[in-house]
Image: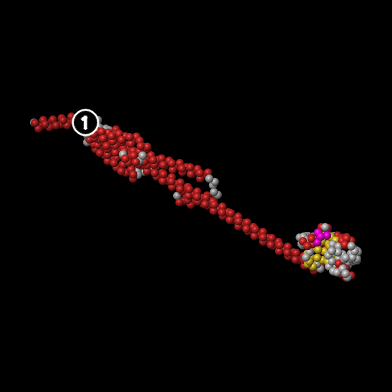
Amino acid sequence: MSQAEKDEAQRYAAADLQRARDELSGAQTAAADRNYPSALRLADRAAVDADLASARASSAKAEQSSEQVHRSLDTLRQQLEQSPAPSPEAGSGASGPGQDQQ
Amino acid sequence: MTHSTGNNLFIAAAVAALLAGCATAPRTSPELDRARDAVETLSSRPQLTDSAQPDLRAAQADLSRAEAALKNDDPMDEVNQLAYLSLRHAQAGEARVDAARAQAEVAQSTEERQRLLLDAQKRQALAAQQQAQNAQQQVEEAKNEAQEARTQAQVAQAQLASEQQQIKQMQTEQLGARQTDQGMVVSLSNVLFSTGKSTLQPGAHLELDRLASFLKDHPRQRVLIEGNTDSTGSADYNEKLSATRAQAVAQGLELRGVPENQYQTIGLGEAYPIASNDTSAGRQQNRRVDVVFSDSSGQFSEAALSRQNSIRR
């Protein structure tokens, strides 16, 4: 649960985190009622749901930064296209070897 | 018998149990179905990353335990609990695969961005280099052109000087000219005038023939015909007389067909004697006409022009 909170699951995977919290408090209640089998089950569920919340938060964050980098790449491409093109000889000379290496 | 009866009872019970088993549908669990689907989806992802491997193993382990529990007729709660855990592990694995893919995209885009920037810098540098080279080339071309023009000018100057030299030589040899500060000058010493007279003496004709022939051969050459007198008579009278003497020579050239634009006349009066006016011989030398030559392009020397201007005033 604390790992999930560290991964900002509250912001990126709120539903999964809430479910884990509910299960955890259910486990605590069951333990208080000495219903240990139920407490154990709910605790196991809370653990996997917290892990899922953590994984989904990481995924959402990575997706977000991927979009950001992609946008800035598009912007850069547009800027380069708009900037005055160098002379044809100079242009082919610069991009030719560069592309071969790629 | 008892044994046989017992056997029969056992068989009956077994048949009943079998019948009961057939009548009851096989136990199913939607939770378990979802877990199976999720595990299968995750395990068939082509780009299953290392980060998702523990999730897949946990999901498969829980799924096997759920399947076993179902087979063992364990309580459905136990089956569903294991199926739930398996499903969540599989879902977490999916999320980790997605995260890894997005992170790879970030790295790729970042790299691409850097490559584009580097390429742009290279292109700019190359364009600048090209520009510098072009500028250098233009400078070289301009230098060469200037050098060529200088060489041409030098050649032309040398030609002109050589031409000038040739003409001076001809002027000296054929006409008896001499170098003075005014330029090449021929004193028509044989064109003698009597005191107060401007009529050409017969001895003048040979000299005029040579001068006229030279001027017709060199149409760009011009001459300044300067009339001079001795100091007999007033300065005013002498100036007019000297002008008339110069015009007499000009007339001689005209008669010989020299174009008008090649000569001009001026009367210098008694201002430029070349000998003493105290003796008869000196006075005779001073009664003369000097022919001043221009250079080969028709320009008179500064000294010749300033002498001309001093009289005009």
Image: B238 above or below B24: below
Q: To which residue does mark 1 refer?
A: B21
Q: Position of residue B269 (x, y in %)?
A: 86, 62
Instruction: Identify which residue is drawn at 73% across, 65% down.
Output: B162
**Of B306 and B259, which appears nearest the observer?**
B306
Kind of residue indicated by mark 1: Gly
Image: A41 above or below B266: above
| Side of B164 where B130 appears, left or right | left
| Side of B105 where B177 appears, left or right | right
Q: Secondary structure at mark 1?
A: helix
Q: Position of residue B242 (x, y in %)?
A: 87, 62
Residue B233 seen from this side: yes
Q: How is the image coloured?
A: secondary structure
> Where does the C terminus of chain B fall, quadrant-wise?
bottom right
Which region of the structure is painted magenta? B307-312
Residue B98 seen from this side: no
Q: Position of residue B205 (x, y in %)?
A: 87, 65
Instruction: Identify which residue is drawn at 52% across, 52% down.
Output: B125
Instruction: Identify which residue is drawn at 60% across, 56% down.
Output: B139
Principal SS element in the magenta part?
helix
